[in-house]
Image (tube, rainbow, N blue to C red):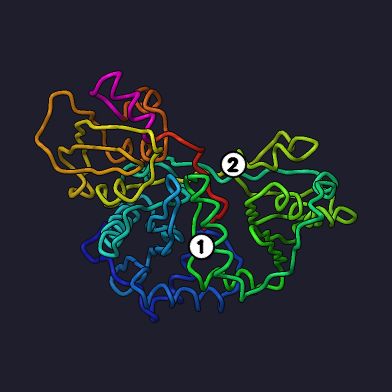
Amino acid sequence: MTDALRVVDVAEEHVDSAWQVRQRSFGPGGDKDEWRKTALEFAQDGRYLGVLDGDELVAAARIWPFEQWWGGRRIPMAGVAGVVVAPEYRGRGVASLLMRAVLKRSVEKGYPLSALYPATTVLYRHLGYEFGGGRYQFTFPAADLRTLGGRGVQVRKAGKADAQLFIELASKLHAAERSNGPLIWPLSEVESWLGDDDNFAYVADDGFVVYNWSDGNLSVDEMVAGSEETARALWATVGSGASIARSVYVHTAPTDPVHLLAEHEAEAQARVQRWMLRLIDAPAAIAQRGYAAGAVLDLSVRIEDADLPANAGDWRLSVADGTGSLVAAEPAEDAVRLGARGLAALYAGTPVAALRGAGLLSGGSAAADAALDNAFGGSTAYMIDYF
């Protein structure tokens, strides 16, 4: 790196340069005018950071204002996306400089959590991110879905005006299921999604489905159902395209009821994209997460976090009655010890035995391990969205 390199808020005069770096990083594609419009929205809200060498923009990254479900509770989450570095500046510490600024800005914006889809794990692990879950795509025969029934459920076409209803229906489901990982997009983005003529959206009293065409087959973006009959009706609506589409690609949880409803199993080769998680404000992240009603935990924890030192130190971690807390405490010889990566993986439900096997957690006791697994375990963490 040179002394001329500095982190800045991306401004309007930088946007065209950011597009050029993006093209060199990700390849050609996309509508430049639409991309530019969105980029300016990020810039105006202080969620678009870049690195300049002199007056030239050589790297950039965005922060999405998401919420994410953990233990059935919604938590603000900084979704890091569009991390690009000009080819001639790679391997010179520019990405690390940029991402440390992203972490700092995420703190300033008040996000307890951050998540991203990594192009490389090396950079993000150095900065405290670790795998949190997956984005799963399964493929079902369209004809199977067509026969699922649900004819007694009233299903209507949905549109942009239903955006808030969709958020409420999804929220009700994820709270009831104590979901881990799914996102809630800003209302304006949900409106745009439902207003896109390429998407087909249908809604019932307790559920909805959004899908589209994909290379002659159908692809389901999201399906939410609060009952078996609604699930059958919505899947059958998608499957009604079986006369044209042989297959339906479905982004959903690996434990979604569709796996139990469909007559034939999904194709064996499911697609999984891994995403990474990081705790930005550890006490807030612990306090806002949901936990199993019967989970009880009270133990000493020592956290190491060089990039976000406010998370580091000795703490008392407690869980009871479905809620948790992380409070500063005196050092203890029997403390569970872990760094930012181990803390993120634990938060996402990774078994303690796996963390010990990877060297991401030490100290504590067998009883502490069992209590941690009971508190942070639960349904498999997943996302249905790529950002």
Q: Residue at x 42, y 51 (%)?
A: 73
> Is 116 situated above or below 58?
above
- Of residues 252 and 338, the one drawn nearer to the viewer in this rendering: 252
Side of 313 relative to 229 (left or right):
left
Q: Label 2 crowding class (10 Å Cα cut-off): few <14, some 14-19, many 20+?
A: some
What residue is pinned by disc 2? 272
Side of 262 relative to 341 (left or right):
right
Q: Tell me the SS state at disc 1.
A: helix
The image position of residue 273, as x and y in percent, is: 56, 44
Prevailing secondary structure of the magenta residues = helix
The image position of residue 110, as x and y in percent, is: 29, 61
Q: Tell me the SS state at disc 2.
A: strand
Q: Residue at x 38, y 23 (%)?
A: 353
The image position of residue 272, as x and y in percent, is: 59, 41
Q: Is residue 367 magenta?
A: yes
Examine the image and state in which quarter residue 257 appears. Answer: top right
- Of residues 53 and 203, the one drawn nearer to the viewer in this rendering: 203
Q: Amino acid at mark 1?
A: Arg
The image position of residue 339, as x and y in percent, is: 26, 37
Please identify the residue farthest to the bottom as the structure is shown: 13
Side of 226 relative to 40 (left or right):
right
Q: Residue at x 10, y 32 (%)?
A: 331
Examine the image and state in which quarter residue 139 appears. Answer: top right
Q: Quadrant of the N terminus?
A: bottom left
Residue interval drawn in magenta: 361-375
Q: Label 1 crowding class (10 Å Cα cut-off): few <14, some 14-19, many 20+?
A: some
Please identify the residue farthest to the right as the structure is shown: 243
Q: Is residue 57 magenta?
A: no
Please identify the residue farthest to the left as the structure is shown: 330
Q: Amino acid at mark 2?
A: Val
Q: Residue at x 33, y 51 (%)?
A: 288
What residue is pinned by disc 1? 24
